[in-house]
Image: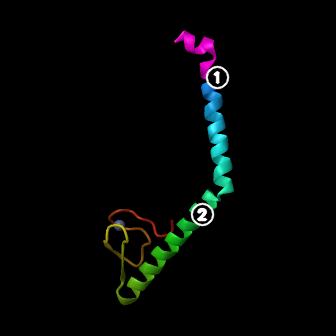
Amino acid sequence: MNDIFNSGLLIYLLVGIGIFFLMREVVCWYWKVNETNSLLREILTELRKGNATISSTTTNQWECPDCQTLNPNSTYECTKCGLDLNK
Ligand SMILES: [Zn+2]
């Protein structure tokens, strides 16, 4: 165990891991991965709201897209699986 500390291998490993996370951030920024991810989440939320609205116009209930449980229109959270339509 002492050999690892004395040889400086640990420092090389830590610097390597640091460079990896730094380059990961640069790559994610360049390819707009974070922006795309948040946009996709917004689209998913809007689609869920749209589907819930469409099904709630005919009945007083909306169907959960994950577990297909019928929930009352007064709530935005699924009573069975806890899916929140606002998130
Ligand atoms: Zn559910």
Q: Is residue 23 above or below residue 32?
A: above
**The residue stretch that appears in magenta:** 1-11
Horizontally, residue 66 falls left or right of residue 23, namely left
Q: Secondary structure at mark 1?
A: helix
User: Is 65 colored magenta in this rendering?
Assistant: no
Residue occupying the point 39% across, 62% down: 82
Identify the residue shown where x is 55% and y is 10%. Answer: 2
Query: Residue 39's spot in the image, x, y percent?
Result: 59, 67
- Name the amino acid type tagged 1: Ile
Whichever of labels 1 and 2 marks the residue nearer the N terminus, that label is 1
Q: How many marks?
A: 2
Ligand 1 positioned in quadrant: bottom left
In the picture, the disc for residue 36 is 2
Please tell me how crowded label 1 is: few (under 14), some (14-19), or many (20+) other residues with Cα within 10 Å.
few
The part of the image, by quadrant, that contains residue 73 is: bottom left
Q: Position of residue 26 (x, y in %)?
A: 68, 48
Alpha carbons under labels 1 and 2: distance apart? 35 Å
82 vs 45, left or right, is left
Residue in the picture at 65% in, 47% down: 25
- Is 48 situated left or right of 29 in this image? left
Residue at which label 1 appears: 11
State whether the magenta stretch is mostly helix, strand or loop.
Answer: helix
Beta carbon at label 1 within 8 Å of ligand 1: no
